[in-house]
Image: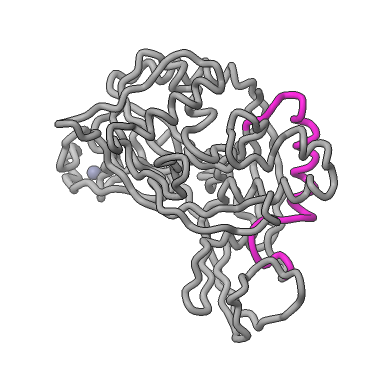
Amino acid sequence: MIELQATMISLAPLHLGTGRKRGTFFKTFDYVPGRTLRGMLGYYLYNNNKDLFEKLAIDEDCDMGKTNIFLKDAHPLSKNEFTVASPIAYLWCKGCYKLMGYKETECKDPNCLQEGTKISGFITKSSLLTGKLEKGSVNKQIDTKCPITRKGHTSPGSDFELSPYHIESIVPKTKFGFNTVLEAEYVDEVKAALREAGIFSGLGGFRSRGYGSVAFKNFKETPVSEVIEERASKISEFSEKLLVTNSSLLLKQDKNSKNSFIGFGELSGENPFSEAVRKTLAQRQIKGSLLVKTDNGKPKQRITESLAGGWSIKHGNKATGLVPCTGPGSCVEIESKSPKALAALEVYGIGERTNCGYGDVYFIGGRI
Ligand SMILES: [Zn+2]
């Protein structure tokens, strides 16, 4: 497998629908969900390269052992550097934006002495290493439109009314960090397909209104074996480890449930999170395990909640329902004797629909 990264630049306004509409206002996400990227590439391949569509198994919704491409959420870049969801267990100084130490309540700098605060949104990975905060963010605009009616309009939805509406969007020339993992033999074809799909299919909503075109630049390919080796050596340096969710995490409660289990704890004697970890490692034939640290039987965790949106290629490339789940930036203390297994979890993700960007995680040093 290959990790394929690129800089994705918006050429037109981007509207990444949250699935929720407030009155006549359509809010956008400030990142590009992996499921939206899969929608763009999948739709393009279905119409233009059915052979590659089949080989990648890009429409697989259930068995992550069968798919040959994983499309991750694309976060805004910060000065050309990739960003991650900010860990909510970390506090940053309100005055000088330096990382606070464990259980520290005020800044150590005698000229500052401010208290700490949580940071939401996206920060560079080097912020976590240098302790100096660098955020990734996007500029947005709002356009007011008058409705047009035409058949086959994919968005807005069926409850669309004939009154002026307001579209929030990310402005053109915004840069995002595109990251995908795929079988080596399809890399060249996928690169070509992304270039075309970004222009001719586009991303997100209101494409008939001129929204959604993107360009891909600076492609970089790294064998996954190298990525794992490099990350494993870094992870092994942390004596206390936190797992941080870099996207929403979907964990099946049981076979028939459509709900997601929230957090890293137990559910009637079972642990949906540990089960999902075991599954990823087994699918990729990687040895090792991960143990969630507990205090009085409860996981040492700080969690956020979010809503996961579905996007099924199999069901006519249409949005499906919203599911409450563990949100990005959630943290849990873990133990593991196998840094390589942890690095592999960073590459392949944990839980349901990791091919759509869900269940993306990373490991840092730290405690709850
Ligand atoms: Zn300070």
Q: In front: 308, or 231?
A: 308
Q: Is residue 107 magenta?
A: no
Residue 360 horizontal/vertical position (percent): 48, 37
| Secondary structure character of the magenta stretch overall | helix
Residue with the most extreme bottom position:
163
Residue 200 falls in which quadrant of the image?
A: bottom right
Residue 171, x across and y down, in percent: 60, 62
Instruction: Give the total of numbered labels.
Output: 0
User: Which residue is painted at 31% across and 21% down in the image?
Assistant: 335
Q: Is residue 199 above or below residue 81?
A: below
> Would you say 2 lies left or right of 120 here?
right
Nearest the camera: 21 or 122?
21
State the residue at coordinates (41%, 53%).
324
Residue drawn 52% across and 54% down? 309
Looking at the rendering, in which quadrant would you find the N terminus? top right
Q: Position of residue 45 (x, y in %)?
A: 79, 45
Image-based side of 286 in relation to 319, left or right: left
Q: Can the viewer see residue 84?
A: no
Magenta extent: 181-208
Q: What residue is shown at x 57% (from left), y 58% (from top)?
A: 320
For the residue pair 284 and 212, the one nearer the viewer reads as 284
Q: Quadrant of the C terminus?
A: top left
Q: Is residue 277 visible?
A: yes
Q: Is 336 above or below relative to 208?
A: above
Q: Is residue 162 above or below residue 312?
A: below
Give above or below for 28 relative to 293.
below
Quick check: which quadrant has ligand 1?
Answer: top left
Q: How is the image coloured?
A: one colour
